[in-house]
Image (tube, grey):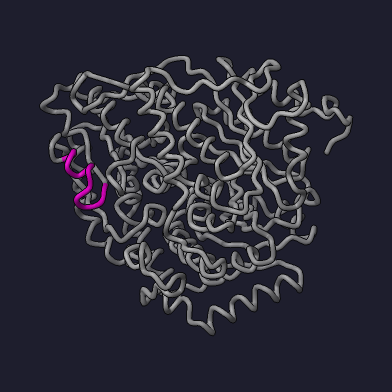
Amino acid sequence: MQISALRASADFGAQVQRAAERLAAERVYDRILARDHTVWRPDPTEIADRLGWLDSPHVMRDAIGPIRQLIDSVRTDGYTHALLLGMGGSSLAPEVFRAIFGVADGFLDLSVLDSTQPDTVLAKERTLDPARTLFLPATKSGGTVETLSLLKYFYNRTADAVGPAEAGRHFAAITDPSSGLEALAQHLGFRHIFRNDPNIGGRYSALSYYGLVAAAAIGADLSRLLDRAERATADPQPGIQLGAFLGAGALAGRDKLTLITSPAISAVGAWIEQLIAESTGKDGKGLLPVDLEPECAAHTYGPDRLFVHLRLDDTADARVQAIIEAGHPVLCLQLADAYDLGAAFLHWEIATAIAGFFLDIHPFDQPDVEAAKELARQMVTAYQQSGALPAPTPDLVDGLALYGPVQGTTLPQALAHFLASGEAGRAYIALQAHLPPTPTTTAALQDLRRHLLARTGLATTLGFGPRFLHSTGQLHKGDAGRGLFIQLTADSAEDAPIPDEAGASASSITFGVLAQAQALGDRQALVSQGRAVLRIHLGADIDAGIAQLRCALDPNNDPTGEVQ
């Protein structure tokens, strides 16, 4: 990956240059290589033991053999599919590899499950034959509730299909040494346990076992990926320059990092989103990654935008040129081919660490992620004791049920007032969809984003829960608090029990209850941080509910009669 162009005004270009000069004067990258925690903090906590990603391109060479041995053995045994069970940093790089590389002939058709929505879990179960599937539960901590819930569920389904004695042979764990998952995998007789370097944080783990096992499963060339990453270590300048660009943008108030990607590599945006959001969104600061935002006229963008163009072909060049001509800064990153992802991962990790230096934040912790998890745990405990989750009364019912800061007596009025509360040129709108991420629902929500952008001019993001809780969830609670959060929930068509223990039939909670608890917990965490949150319950018909929202955004329904 190389920087092919930086287009910006003379003033912003000078700011980027000053940022680069500061990096050189303070030897920031050299100090990062030397594991100098004082780049960010005087205390080494969660820094000294979070820089192992710098070594991944080299040390993972020795892991290629064992990874290939596992994949070859299951192929020989007739396996045709793989399902990675993970969240956040454990699942996003595998999803990127699958989307961009596809599946080579004779290798495993890999998919990723990072949802607790029961409709999604059941839909995935119905597409797989456990007898021909390799399950890959992946979690750094070994205790991620979503991952372990999915593991227990699919272990039981596999035991039903092939018998308890053989079920463990269909699983290979990816975790840190001495984790709870490692102990469980040993107890259940997993086929293999990949023990990752514990000095690598989850969102920096794309080039470790967490990413490379999945890449090998689909037949990607691991040596070639690591070759490109090693080139990036030999020439780190693209990452350093990207870091200066991000840092200058954040300091200038251009904190909405908008990604424009060539279609063939568009999946990488979700990985970048987590890396940036979870690393920089804290202490009242942050860079908001805006991924897959629908295209709009260049003059629509506000002065808070910063653009990075990841270019593999020329399909987005006209759009980028229009953005440049509208006066917005754009950094163009050129990939030679799909295997340049190896370099891109490392360069973005370098840039994110450098952005943390400019923002004066700790780029390796995630202090606000735990708040929503704890609230969800409390709600699950209350459910197990009482048999019910909290059931708040809607603040307005107009076709859909609304909970939160509602003004007006109709859905259009309530939406208009909520959206008008955002500060022009500074706020953003986050659609938090606690819904099954089907293609139909995703397309409908992207259309909703398009209309929100046209109506308000504000940056828009879309995240599916609980996935986004492990990525943008940190930024939502830790940044400057300018977000307008529209939380979308719905009734599940079906539900599925979560086994209390793998191999046992007893269950004290379902996926539906867990998903509801996570949505309620995250909303409470946001409200506790003073964030503006409007929950909209779509009912049983998700598509119809989204259509009602789209209709309510029509300017003819605005109480002022004008597009805001």
Image: 366 above or below 379: below
Residue 313 image offset from top left, x and y in percent: 59, 54
**Quarter of the image holding residue 135?**
top left
For image coordinates 68% across by 17% down, the residue present is 397
Q: How many marks?
A: 0
For image coordinates 54% across by 38% down, the residue present is 463
Name the foreground residue: 3 vs 116: 116
Q: Is residue 189 left or right of residue 114?
A: left
For image coordinates 46% across by 40% down, the residue present is 372
In the image, the segment drawn in magenta is 175-185
Report if residue 270 lies within the magenta region.
no
For image coordinates 64% across by 58% down, the residue present is 255
**Quarter of the image holding residue 400?**
top right
Is residue 286 visible in the rendered structure shown here?
no
Image: 159 above or below 90: above
Q: Is residue 229 left or right of residue 437?
A: left
Q: Is residue 421 left or right of residue 503?
A: right
Residue 280 image offset from top left, x and y in percent: 52, 58
**Quarter of the image holding residue 401?**
top right
Name the foreground residue: 294 vs 72: 294
Residue 339 image offset from top left, x and y in percent: 43, 56
Name the foreground residue: 466 vs 163: 466
Is residue 27 visible in the rendered structure shown here?
yes
Q: Residue furthest left?
A: 165
Residue 330 image offset from top left, x and y in percent: 67, 62
Report if residue 184 lies within the magenta region.
yes
Q: Quadrant of the C terminus?
A: top right
